[in-house]
Image: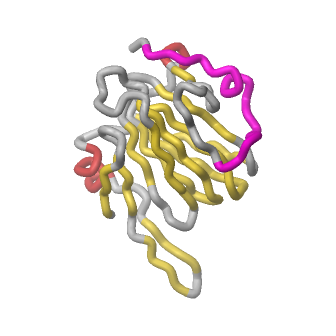
Amino acid sequence: MHVETTQLQGVKLLVPEVFTDHRGSYAEIYDRVKYHDATGGVEFVQDDLSISHERVLRGLHGDFATTKLVSVLSGTGYALVADNRPESATYRRWQAFELSGSNRRQLLLPPGIGNSILVLQGPLLYWYKQSTHFAPGRQFTIRWDDPEWGFVWPIAEPILSERDRRGAYATAT
């Protein structure tokens, strides 16, 4: 596995080796010992999986307590992450990545990073590990088209949940 820094403080791009031959491909997507070193000792307590159709945009969601490891198992997605930590040197900056079932890239997201995935090719299976159990009361949502953030999306009219359409911008910890 290769670990790369990103433009956002504390966000890492993890690129596992993918072995491909005439049968298909193989990649190790989690090993407790290797990921303990790569994450600085984060212990994950919950795994989640969402399945979405093309043009669906999920997020930008986050909280100030949870580290996440996110990856696409099948399909192709535009993962946009945003730094919502007022104390961070990269506060209110964002960066986008292509995550796919082919490239197997993963993002390590510290607490306070808003996380989203836009399905470019689906169905998309989005897998993520969390360091805390889900707690709706501590979540924040940044509106996907908030003009103050200046997000750039590859499509103009994604399919959204009501929560994501409204957004509920928050910086409180």
- State which region is magenta: 154-171
In the image: residue 82, left or right of residue 143 = left
- Taking 54 as reference, is 92 above or below it? above
Please tell me which residue is depicted at 31% across the width and 38% down the height of the picture: 9
Quarter location, residue 173: top left
At a point 57% along the width and 87% down the height, the residue shown is 22
137 displayed left or right of 110? right
Q: Residue at position x 62%, y 32% from top?
A: 144
Give the vertical position of 71 relative to 47 (above or below).
below
Task: Examine the rendered structure and indicate whether residue 135 appears above or below residue 107.
Answer: above
Q: Residue furthest bottom?
A: 22
Residue in front for this viewpoint, 140 or 91: 91
Name the residue nearer the viewer: 56 or 144: 144
Question: Residue 35, how many percent across, how many down?
Answer: 30, 51
131 vs 71, left or right, is left
Main SS category, magenta section = loop
Image coordinates of residue 45 in percent, x first then y, are: 41, 35
Q: In which image quadrant can residue 43 be found? A: top left
